[in-house]
Image (cartoon, rainbow, N blue to C red):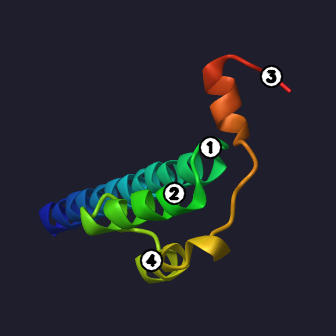
Amino acid sequence: MLGAAGFFTFLGTVIAQGVESYTAMNLERQKYEYELISSILSDPEIEKNDAANQLLFLIKIEAIQALNTEVLEEAASTPENLPKLPEAPLNRRAAGTSR
């Protein structure tokens, strides 16, 4: 009886660790994809047509998977409606500038 309780405790711990690892990995994937999209849409030197082509390319090669690719693909299909984001604060920090 005690061995069975220990086994199920161990099994529960393994399952919980697996779920936690999967969740953390998925969150990091979403952060990475957001940074890709944000860096394209916030770069003042990238024209809307080029930004749309870059986004469509990232979707095609499946570099963007976890986020809603259908909505992103629809937005990129009409570059004139593609939003331009202000320069990302994270990009300024990485470049060593502050505002």
Name which residue type carries label 3: Ser
Look at 56% across and 46% down and name the residue there.
Answer: 39
Task: Give coordinates of residue 46: x percent, y percent.
Answer: 57, 47
Q: Residue under label 2, please give it.
A: 51
In percent of width and height, residue 38 lies at: 58, 52
Mark 4 vs mark 2: in front: 2
Task: Please tell me whether mark 1 sits on a helix, a strand or a loop.
Answer: loop
Residue at mark 2 to residue at mark 3: CA–CA distance: 25 Å
Contact flag, marks 2 and 1 (Cβ < 8 Å): yes
Q: Amino acid at mark 1?
A: Asp
Closer to the chain start, of discs 2 and 1, is 1
Disc 1: which residue? 43
Label 3 Cα crowd, 10 Å radius (few <14 / some 14-19 / many 20+) = few
Find the distance from the CA under tag 1 to the CA under tag 4.
19 Å
Query: What is the quadrant of residue 33 in the picture?
Result: bottom left
Nearest the camera: 1 or 95? 95
> Horizontally, is 56 left or right of 82 in the view?
left
- The residue where tag 4 is placed is 73
Secondary element under disc 2, as helix, strand or loop, is helix
Q: Residue at x 63, y 73 (%)?
A: 80
Q: Quadrant of the C terminus?
A: top right
Name which residue type carries label 4.
Glu
Residue 95 sits above or below residue 76 on the image: above
Q: Callout 4: helix, strand or loop?
A: helix
Tell whether label 3 touches label 2 (CB within 8 Å).
no
Q: Position of residue 29 (x, y in %)?
A: 40, 54
